[in-house]
């Protein structure tokens, strides 16, 4: 929603919101809210690898789902689903030329940097820290 606020305040330039497919799946309501209150300079980009990459590449369980289809139903004015570099360049060229809220679903491979940070604690340790209020910010 921060991207929405930025786009709403800054009508001069396009605002790109980068999202993972796992994140969109977990926060599906954001598509409905954004579709209901469109901002013409917002481009919502879904990096779709069919996994929760930030926690080790666990499959989302939603392989083959069209997030672009959800965005379209939610009310995004333009939706592009791309699978390769050529399609991406074509979609970006169209996005540059028009001001309308857009959803861009990009199929990407399931790989990441070797030094990408991962949670070090087990789920049990996280639960126990949460229960003890350890590590709570604020």
Image (spheres, grey):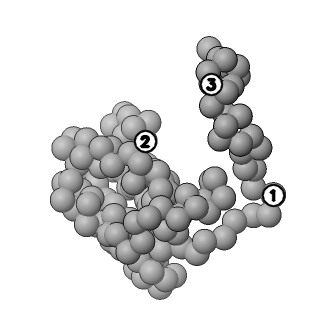
- Give percent across and percent down for residue 43: 38, 55
Give the left or right position of residue 93, taking residue 53 as reference: left
Q: For mark 2, give the secondary structure.
A: helix
Q: Which mark is drawn over residue 85? A: none
Residue at 67% over, 37% down: 124
The C terminus - image quarter? top right
Residue hosting label 3: 130
User: Callout 2: 10 Å neighbours few (<14), some, many (20+)?
Assistant: some
Query: Which mark lies nearer to you, 2 or 3?
Result: 3
Q: Are dots 2 and 3 in contact, CB under 8 Å?
A: no
- Pick whichever of labels 1 and 3 is earlier in the sequence: 1
Residue hosting label 1: 115
Specify the quadrant of the image occupied by residue 129. Answer: top right
Answer whether residue 115 is visible to the viewer in this image: yes
Query: Which mark lies nearer to you, 1 or 3?
Result: 3
- Residue at the top extreme of this rendering: 138
Specify the quadrant of the image occupied by residue 10. Answer: top left
Q: CA distance from mark 1 to mark 3?
A: 26 Å
Q: Is residue 49 above or below residue 102?
A: below
- Give percent across and percent down for residue 90: 40, 79
Q: Is residue 112 above or below residue 91?
A: above
Residue hosting label 2: 3
The residue closer to the viewer here, 127 or 2, is 127
Give the left or right position of residue 27, taking residue 133 as reference: left
The residue closer to the viewer here, 77 or 33, is 33
- Give percent across and percent down for residue 39: 27, 45
């Amino acid at each position: 929603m921060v991207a929405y606020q930025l786009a709403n305040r800054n009508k001069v330039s396009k605002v790109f919101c980068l999202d993972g497919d796992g994140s969109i799946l977990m926060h599906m309501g954001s598509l409905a809210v954004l579709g209901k209150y469109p901002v013409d300079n917002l481009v919502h980009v879904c990096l779709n690898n069919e996994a929760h990459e930030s926690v080790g590449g666990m499959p989302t369980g939603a392989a083959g789902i069209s997030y672009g289809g959800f965005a379209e139903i939610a009310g995004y004015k333009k939706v592009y689903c791309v699978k390769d570099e050529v399609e991406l360049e074509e979609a970006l060229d169209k996005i540059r030329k028009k001001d309308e809220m857009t959803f861009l679903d990009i199929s990407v491979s399931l790989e990441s940097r070797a030094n990408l940070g991962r949670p070090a604690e087990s789920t049990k340790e996280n639960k126990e820290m949460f229960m003890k209020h350890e590590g709570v910010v604020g």
